[in-house]
Image: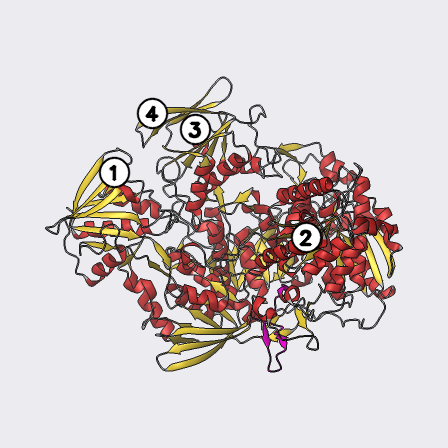
Amino acid sequence: MQDQSDIIRQYYEEVPIQDDYLIKVPELVMMDDEAPDLGSAAKIVAEMAVRKWKATVEGDVLIVGAGITGMQAALDIAEKGYRVVLVEKSSTIGGNMVKLDKTFPTNDCSICTAAPKMVEVSRHPNIKLLTYSEVTRLDGEKGDFTAHVYRKSKYVDPTKCTGCDDCTAVCPVEVVNPFDEKLSRRKAIYIEFPQAVPIIYTIDYEHCVGCGACERACEPQAISFLEKSEDIEVKAGSVIVASGFELFEPLEMRKEYGYGKYPNVITAMQFERLLSSFGPTEGKPRRPSDGKKPKSIAWIQCVGSRSKQLGFPYCSRVCCMYATKEASIIKEAEPDLDITIFYMDIRAYGKDFQQYYEKAMGLGVNYVRARPSSVYQNEDKSITVKYMDTHSRKVGEKTVDLLVLSTAIIPSKENKRLAQKLGLEADDCGFFRSESVLSNPIQSSRSGVYLAGCNQGPKDIPDCVSMGCGAAAKAVVPIKDRKKVRPAEPPAEKDVAGKEPRIGVFVCHCGKNIASYVDVDAVTKYAQALPNVVYTAHEMFVCSEDIQKRIKEKIRDEDLNRVVVAACSPRTHGPLFQDTLVQGGLNKYLFEMANIRNHCSWVHSHEPAKATEKAKDLVRMAVVKAGMLEPLAERTVGVIPRALIIGGGISGMEAAIALSEMGIDSHLVEREKELGGNLRRLHSLFPADVSATDVIAPLIERVRGDPRIAVLTGSELVHVEGFIGNFKGKLKTPDGEKEVEFATAIIATGFREIDLAGRYGYGQSPKIVTQMELEKMLMDGTTPRFKSVVMINCAGAMDEQRPYCCRIGCGVAIKNAKILLQINPKAEISLLYRDIRVFGKEEEEYYADVIEKGVKIIRYLKEAETEVVVGGDGTVRVKVKDSIYSDTHELPADLVVLTAETEGNVATDKIKQMFKVPAGLGNFFSEAHAKIRPLDFSADGVYICGSAHYPKNLADTIAQAQGAASRAAIPIMQGIVKSEGIISVIDPERCSGCGLCVEVCPYTAIELDERKVAVVNETLCKGCGACAAACPSGSARQKGYRDNQILAMIRSAIV
Amino acid sequence: MSDDFEPLIVTFCCNWCSYAGADLAGTSRVQYPPNIRIIRVMCSGMVHPNLVIDALMKGADGVLICGCHPGDCHYLEGNLTAEKRAEAIRLMLEDLGIETERFRLEWVSASEGQRFGKVVKDMVEQIKTLGPSPYRTQRMTQ
């Protein structure tokens, strides 16, 4: 994990902290007439002491909290051209996500997906970071807020600290490390974790003994004990609160589960730290009592969740999956481990969650359905869990080496105080109150202040990211007419055409990362002798700020026209050096990297001599290629200031409204004659008993009356061409064909129930209906007083053909059971279920209430264990094998309601083809990244939201729709899009017109013109090079990767 | 064929998955033999068979192409093209009298640092048992 820290450290060195351009000239009050004339270090300290800063930061949006939600919101706003002030109370940004080892259900490394966002936030010119700071008051109103921010002193000068870690080595004070969930110790001067951003050490004032050891050890003299904390005034037009969550500390459950009493009982977050490669055990979990490898581990679920007595009444939404993740990661690494998860219901409700859960079972993770009553510690410090298996009804005991408690997500303890400071309302638990949990989740109780992330209820990472984007869309509205901040124009490019290559080679030590294993000096000398190389240097950190300056100087002074950096990976650092080239007046494609760290020093650290030889080879290959590089142009194209939204259901309408509020026009295309989508056919909504019509009708009216929204009902998109910024589409409308132009598209086509014909007796009797059909009945008011109702959940779901959970069925069934009970309080209602998956706030409480009202629940395991029998006399009975009591019930029913599995809507296949976007299982569209890019496709300019992505409840749908609007607004608000520089080019002289390239091009970027010559559309081409590899005449070539360039590299590799 | 034969394997890694996987191998400090020279390409599907043949004819002891797993290709189906092409490459190698084992196409995702190391290790071992390329002498005498 070392390299991540380096990456960020190096990035950090490039841009120390955000430039002070946002800060108005501070009021500088000198207490004496002059600063005393002392030695340089002392002088700085003295200056710091006498300065009384009173800074005002002028921003457009203030964001409180820089976890994944706050970071995403900040980026979405900054990308639109507005200035963000991001306030974070800890000394680094990143929040809780960076503590996780991996993320479900893809097992992506958490820090690896979060760190690039952290770096992007810290480098963004429109984002001003205030870490170690807290908002103390919020005055003013929407459009004109003044926040008072208290920035605590880190006692370390951010402009000097290089993050070298010398200070911690000498600090004599050790304290418990909260970042590692108290499993390790850190010094009184610290950074939270190696990849922290900004990478500035912080002195923990509470524990510092003031010995001065760090000050003496600090070479750059960054320690300044006299630095004062400061009050900063932040001006902003709107505020986003993304203050995050805390985890339940099960100390109150010491009696039951022994946390805090027995050393080998830990929380799931502690286990994450044990799994993490930069955690206290470097990714190899050990038990706290003796540091030994555990042979058996158990998890207890719902600790602090789903319990009014001990903890909180709601379901925390993520624990089933994080426990499954932790268990399967460790089981996969050590197949002999004995792993048990004690659960109540497995809430594998999200996209791919059910499959993930089944995979864990396949690995041998043992799931036991039980809520253990107590645990005790044995002499060898192992823990015995006492439980009753609710399947076998047997009481059991399980002894394990390590017990992990899956603790609840709870509101931060400071939330209530923060609510007072910000003038917001909090609920009984301490979560912030949304204007409406159901229909306006992002709007807080104060106008101009928006909520996102887990501070109004537990959420999974992608839901947080979506909501962060949604809040960004809302927060832009009050400031949309302000002046946008545009990136500065780079200096003019040096003309290198026809000039001999003059290559500069910069070799990096990367501290010790390269230099400890590779003889950097020898590599540099070797490079010096290579053809065309006119300048060489080796530096401690080539990516540091001062070396960037030097590269620019050398481009000028040595007249360099190609630059090679031998350091780390072009994937992480290429853009940084390319920026430097651009600033130095060179085309950014005249740059090549030799990866002598990730591909050399780190992987051959046991063979330094061979590593040095390999590094020379890699540098030689890079130099050879650099000599053949040519400048490439990135075309900038204008953008059609309009979006297209496909689907006029709740998602599409909310997206259109959010766009309109940001001042952006859209076409809203709906296949049906009326707007409203599935909600139009629903009676009411879970979990608030709100009439669906009450939600949808005002929205339809609002959309219909909005001059920025062109509604096209009864219409379908039949053809699309073009690219981000400039799409052209053909619509089939009731008035004939219509052409539309748009910059970005939002796909909001929703879902439908699958066809159950032939299963569960569906179609054989009018008494057997689906939930959708029941909704219609309820809406029409034609529902008779049913006496006995059987609901079958997961109809057609979670089998081989459709192995996924529909996410919403349990909630819908419970709500409809409640309504049928209201119609006939004496009705016998049985709900056949597999797991009750009501997750998140409000839902669990609603469910508990319905069960109390007398709905009978019966758990069954698979479709084969239910049978719907239609008798000759028209009577219907349902037979079911009860998996808990192992007996078979036969239930008479005058109504059977099937909670049908869902799938992507009819239009999915066509849209997939038209926009070249993927859809996965169940024909739901596949987002670019399951965790951090939930609303984007890999294809630029196309976004998804709502149930087209996966079925979801109203609040999540609305947050996503507003989030997708934010994403789709970015290119439009920027006003331009840039095409790729690395694209294909076809030599018309050599083209034989065979058309092979046209066939292999995945982006339809090549066409044969009237002369039968292939022509590349430069804006459509993504530069994959498929055409170049297919072309039999050698006329198709990929810029930046021409055959002759690669051949030269190959030949240079072989010596 | 002496024991100290150190093969040289020209390796093409696609930018999106395999190059990142090789980066991760570094980050995770996976140790593998230093016999490969990685050339970054945008997609495994852009490696023209001629490039593979050229490398082997010029005396490389092996060529390894690494791409995204099927379904993960950044460019939709470039890796599948590479797979089809691999078959053709093997036929060409047979014609040229080069052992087809000297060429490999492997899928390495961005999260498979360990796997990348293993692929390299396996291939180096295999080439070591095969011995130097028949064209290597040419390279030595050049």
Q: Could you say whether the residue bearing mark 1 is in a helix, strand or loop?
A: strand
Q: Are marks 2 and 3 in contact (CB under 8 Å)?
A: no
Q: Which residue is mark 4?
A: A395
Does the magenta portion include A1022? yes
Give amino acid for label 4: Val
Give a yes or no on whether discs 2 and 1 share a subunit.
Answer: no
Regarding mark 3 in the picture, which secondary structure is present there? helix
Question: Counting residues from the N terminus, which is met first, the one under dot 3 or under dot 1?
Answer: 3
Chain letter behind tag 4: A
**Real-space CA distance between mark 3 and mark 1, rounded to the nearest whole angstrom:** 34 Å
Discs 4, 1 touching: Cβ within 8 Å: no
Q: Is residue B32 visible?
A: no
Label 4: element kind: strand
Measured from the top left, where is residue A24 in percent x and y? Answer: 66, 63
Q: Which mark is residue A881?
A: 1
Q: Nearer the viewer, mark 2 or mark 3?
A: 2
